[in-house]
Image (cartoon, grey):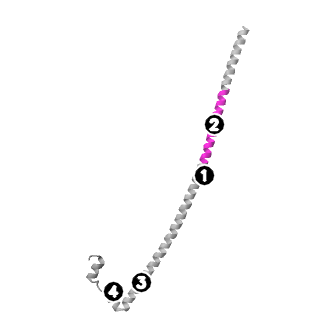
Amino acid sequence: MIARLLGGLCAALALAAGVQTWRLHSARADVDRLQSEAATFAGLRALDAAALTALRDANKRLADAARADETAAAAAAERLQAERDRLAAALDRERKRRADLYRSDTDAKTWADAAVPAAVARSLSGAD
């Protein structure tokens, strides 16, 4: 009877030891899996940080280029407006000079008011 009890106890202890060994191996596998996943996520986080840095740098370069383009466009617009104003003033001066000439010289006014001969108009329009 004692032998049976001892045999049963040994079997129970062996079973318990086997279960504990299985639990230990299972826990080690879980730890290994979790450590692997943590390493993977750390690597991805580093890649994400590098990608974000690259995107920020590219965005800054593009923004700087856009600001430079806007500055150049504004300067060009100012130059064009100044040229327009200069040409408008020159045109006004020429119109005034011509009006003064026509007022002071009747022959010039007569010539300016004369109709263009039909033959000349045809030759200028390319009708001939």
Type of amino acid under label 1: Thr
Element on which disc 2 rests: helix
Q: State left or right for residue 74 relative to residue 37.
A: left
Tell me the residue at 73%/9% (across/down): 3
Q: Quadrant location of residue 1?
A: top right
Q: Residues within 10 Å of mark 3 (few under 14, many from 20)?
A: few
Question: Which residue is disc 3 drawn over?
Answer: 94
Q: Position of residue 48 (x, y in %)?
A: 59, 47
Q: CA distance from mark 2 to mark 4?
A: 96 Å
Q: Which residues are magenta?
A: 24-49
Question: Which residue is disc 1 drawn over?
Answer: 53
Q: Quadrant location of residue 31?
A: top right
Which mark sits nearer the N-terminus, 1 or 3?
Answer: 1
Q: Residues within 10 Å of mark 2 (few under 14, many from 20)?
A: few
Residue at the far right in the pictured view: 2
Question: Which residue is disc 4 drawn over?
Answer: 112
The answer to whether the residues at label 2 and label 4 have Cβ atoms under 8 Å apart is no
Which mark sits nearer the N-terminus, 1 or 2?
Answer: 2
Q: Quadrant location of residue 32?
A: top right
Q: Which mark is residue 36?
A: 2
Q: CA distance from mark 4 to mark 3?
A: 15 Å
Element on which disc 3 rests: helix
Q: CA distance from mark 4 to mark 1?
A: 72 Å
The answer to whether the residues at label 4 and label 1 have Cβ atoms under 8 Å apart is no
Element on which disc 4 rests: helix
